Image (cartoon, rainbow, N blue to C red):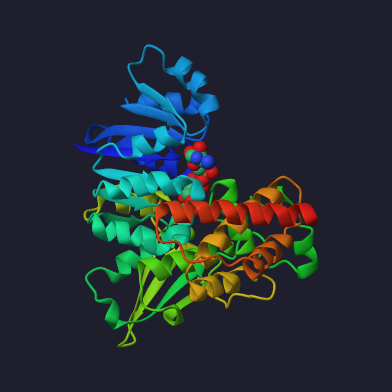
Amino acid sequence: MRSLTVLGATGSVGASTLDLVRREREQWRIVALTANCQAAELAALAREFSAEIAVVADESCLPDLRAALAGSGIETAGGTAALIAAAARPADLTLAAIVGCAGLAPTMAAIERGATVALANKEALVSAGAVMLAAVARHRTTLLPVDSEHNAIFQCLAGNDLAQVRSITLTASGGPFRDWSPAQLTKATPAQAVKHPNWNMGAKISVDSATMFNKGLELIEAHYLFPVGLERLRIVVHPQSVVHSMVEYRDGSTLAQLGPSDMRVPIASCLAWPGRMETPCAPLDLAKLGELTFRAADEERFPATALCRAAAEAGGAAPAVLNAANEIAVAAFLSGQIAFTRIAVMVAQVMSRYSPSAPASLDDVIALDHAARVQTRELLELA
Ligand code: NAD
Ligand code: MG
């Protein structure tokens, strides 16, 4: 039996994770389950999985959580400090699936315990970069990538030396607007943006897929996880989302990982790593799929990937500033405050006006993230 904590248990990745755990219930002991609020949902999961503790990050939701778990014997807690403390409880595996930089401090607490952390929360790695990787090395933590592309690359790299790699190609579905004209893009609505053609995901990452910031953030994520050099990292649009990414070796051999577009596949690979486990996903039927297509990304219509590459090249504080600006701009788009195409414009503006020094600690990253959010909100108000 292994112990598991799920940070962001009520989200899309959290639900996929718990769906797999439910099928092998006897093999897992659940330590902490967390959510931002969603007290009723979180309480139901905590009861079903007999969690040790259930935590809401938003303290105002704690009374509801307490009421929902009364008499269950399950501990409850609320607030940022409680979330971090829960993440620091011993567990063999932590699934880091909070959305946004809000997940950084709890993910770092899990990393500092030195067990295994399966990372879905890409914004945390993009913001903290070197600070997070230094903690991983210092605490001898095993960091497993959940993001389907990085999980694919991790599998394609297995047993090989990065020095043998000629290039790594991240595949991108291109999102719901991949064939839209610039004029159509300016009118894209939040409802259209969150309707991803291939994947069923949380609202923030769905908008990121539509702008291509998701792929850009993933480029930065890959740059940290697989340090082969930015010039060796590529992006190709692959609308079917069957090839999840590939690694080309210097002898001209390219290894790719294929699978259904269902996050339970990469999550299962992390839960069972270094072994394998069953998933309920339908096997790939390539004859039925017929063809797999690929095309270059269009950085004129979707400037996000170029902005992210520039942030990765600049290094230092740039990726954290970019991520914070994007989080605020996505929220402004989702609330109807700005047009879809302004997301990338705002990120570019914040990045050009604001370049703080490189963060050296977790506190630095959090302060930097906060300051970049303030800068972005100021720009929003000016508009
Ligand atoms: P989601 O919105 O469905 O769920 C997010 C979870 O985080 C929820 O449990 C929510 O309660 C919690 N949360 C939100 N704000 C919080 C805060 N301020 N403090 C603490 N907890 C908070 O998101 P998701 O789609 O599951 O994505 C989670 C992460 O995984 C993201 O970083 C995303 O980029 C990454 N990811 C998701 C997918 C996917 O298919 N959904 C694929 C790859 C990577
Ligand atoms: Mg991905």
Residue 27 sits in which quadrant?
top left
**Which residue is situated farthest in the bottom direction here?**
251
The residue located at (66%, 56%) in the rendering is 375
Give the answer, above or below, for where 208 lies relative to 345. above
Relative to residue 356, is residue 42 drawn left or right? Answer: left
Observer-nearest residue: 197 or 55? Answer: 55
Residue 307 sits in which quadrant?
bottom right
Q: Is residue 285 visible?
A: no
Q: Position of residue 273 (x, y in %)?
A: 25, 53
The residue located at (36%, 66%) in the rendering is 225
Q: Position of residue 164 (x, y in %)?
A: 28, 82
Q: Position of residue 308 (x, y in %)?
A: 55, 69
**Which residue is situated farthest in the top direction here?**
71
Q: Position of residue 338 (x, y in %)?
A: 76, 54
The residue located at (45%, 61%) in the rendering is 359
Give the answer, above or below, for where 290 lies relative to 33. below
Which quadrant is the N terminus positioned in? top left
Relative to residue 267, is residue 376 drawn left or right? Answer: right
Q: Is residue 25 visible?
A: yes
Relative to residue 61, is residue 71 drawn left or right? Answer: left
Which quadrant is the C terminus positioned in? bottom right
Give the answer, above or below, for where 198 lies relative to 249. above
The residue located at (42%, 46%) in the rendering is 105
